[in-house]
Image: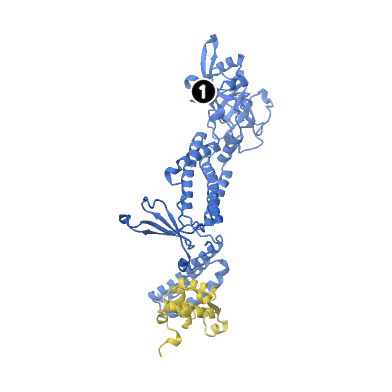
Amino acid sequence: MKPRLGSVFPALHLGLLRAAALLVPPSQCVEWQREWRSELWHVRRERAPQGIVSWRAEREVTLFCLGAFHDALCLRRHALLRLRLPGATPASPAYCIFWLALALVASFALSLLLPGVRAANESVRAQTDPGLILIEHAVTGGNSLATVSAAEFRNWRSRRQRYFDRFAFYSIARENIMPAEGGSPWTVAHATANLFSVLDIPLRFSAPVAGVHGNPTGAVLSCEAFEREFDSNPRIAGSMVQVGRHLAQIVGVAPCGAWPLPGKVDLWLLEPEAAVAPGAMGYVVAHLTALGRAEMFGPTVAITVYGAGDSAIDLFGVELEGRTRVPMDVFRFALLLAFLCLPAVTSVSMGEYNFNSHKPSWPRRLCRWSFLCAKIALLLPIVYYVPLDLAWWHISTSSYASEYVQWIASFLLCLFGMRWVLLDQRQRCPVCLRRVTHPAQVGHASRMFLSWNGTELICMGGHTLLHVPGLPTSWFSAQRWLYLDSSWDFLFAGSSQSGRT
Amino acid sequence: MASEAKLSHTAAMILQAIHAGCIYGFGIMEMTGLPSGTVYPAMRRLERDALIRSQWERQSIADAEQRPPRKYYRLTAAGRATLESSRKRYPLLERLIPSEEAKPV
């Protein structure tokens, strides 16, 4: 038994050294392994002479081999420190700027990769005509319900109009589509042929209706259906699809996120006006004339029309431009609210600077303010892109839910981000911009009338002490900086003194 | 300049051990009682700061004694000067690791 153990332990120890060598940077691996193995031979001879197996001796040799892992990790740490930014420690301003810039680049890169964010950005580019309104019955006005019948629409359209120059109508139904995969019905909008021209939405990959099979019906795919069912095939225009019992030819794809009207539609069927069933309930989009626009007060307008037998019908028009909020508007609103709320979560002052007879020079003060501006300048794009990534991470997320997610995330990120920026700035040494460290509790709260109590922090560059009162009093309400003169230098023998003024 | 460098107690012990005649890594561990994971990185730092220098012994010597060649360490002039100033800072150093000339006969 013993001879077998006598061969097992050396093999185990050599294995440990080889494993440790894997952690050593490759350029030094051979040298270190050679020294470890050489020393191991002597450790073994000293502790476990040949032919004698002792658990205690083997344990000591094993401990020596495990020490090789400490060596390797130490080397790794040194290699990483050499890779770090020159002069950058976790307390240094360069370190702070580096991490903010990294967060910004990551969130921006993510926004370029996520299809939902791309769609949101495309919807920003698709401008909604300010003269477009959505018409609904006044009793349900604002609820985005289909309240107007196709027959009513035809009746109004046939009459002479002063306030409107273009009308379009659509109604939504669930229908089976061939050749769609999965077999689940699609949401199809039966629309008048002029719907997209009234909305002024340019179609992607558009092609004229060829009139094959004697059927002039055109179909427009939604961006989601185009990607999901047709693998974003750019040659999709001209293909035939079967909608219910009718054939339709795909004439284009709607831009992602450009649909400003109620209903999440997979496919629009552009039919002649007469083909829409008279009883179908739907939505009416109208374009205002100059006279009509002059009559608008705010984003809504009350309309009275006369139906059959000159009976008056009260309608309600909502401006489409006001219905769609672009991500930048949400961001601006969240930003405004966050800045208004900021004084409630932190003090907006930069702290009291009591330097005895010393004051930082103008260039140093300028540097300090530039650092603050750089942090805010990096934070604001992060506050824009991170909530955008969160809100539009998936294209199927509805735009209303996305708006709320973006709003809440922007508000919270801006509020607490700005709070962090100000807190961080207040704890930066005014001379070298390093964060003060090593907090020490000074005094007792029960003796606050005899001497101050609070926290004392020190700049590792040896420039300043920061005194933060534990309980603000009339004679010590805000933090104070104390400039350290050269008599303190002996405490900071190893640190840089380059920033001393 | 090097003589003014402030050494940690561990580094000073290693310098003193080398001065006392322990010129191999394992010998230094034995003398100082420090573990291997501390001694070797500390010796690399001392070598980087030019306080000690290392050299592999000749293969022929190792072959004659039927063992692998060892790496041995020596103090440099800067290392000796630094050790002198460290002894003033750590007066017990010499008592912990007596050098050859200080050992009682």
Image location (x, y in percent) of residue A326: 55, 35
Residue A138 lies left or right of residue A445; in this view the side is right
Q: Residues within 10 Å of mark 1 (few under 14, many from 20)?
A: many
**What shade does chain A have?**
blue
- Which residue is the site of mark 1? A146
Residue A259 lies left or right of residue B27; in this view the side is right
Quadrant of image for the N terminus of chain B: bottom right
Report the residue at 55% width, 81% height from top.
B57
Please say whether residue A40 is visible from this viewpoint: yes
Tell me how the rendering is colored.
Answer: by chain
Foreground residue among A135 and B92: B92
Q: Is residue B55 above or below residue A470?
A: below
- Amino acid type at circle 1 is Ala
Image location (x, y in percent) of residue A228: 57, 37
User: As drawn, which residue projects farthest toward the front?
Assistant: A357
Foreground residue among A481 and A404: A481
User: As drawn, which residue projects farthest toward the left?
Assistant: A446
Foreground residue among A386 and A370: A370
Secondary structure state at the residue bearing disc 1: loop
Residue A388 lies left or right of residue B99; in this view the side is right
Disc 1 chain ID: A
Q: Is residue B91 above or below residue A210?
A: below
Image location (x, y in percent) of residue A10: 46, 74
**What shade does chain B have?**
yellow
The tally of labels here is 1
Report the residue at 49% width, 20% height from top.
A138
Quadrant of image for the C terminus of chain B: bottom left
Quadrant in the picture for residue A159: top right
Please say whether residue A65 is visible from this viewpoint: no
User: As drawn, which residue projects farthest toward the bottom?
Assistant: B105
Q: Is residue A301 above or below residue A467?
A: above
Foreground residue among A486 and A425: A486
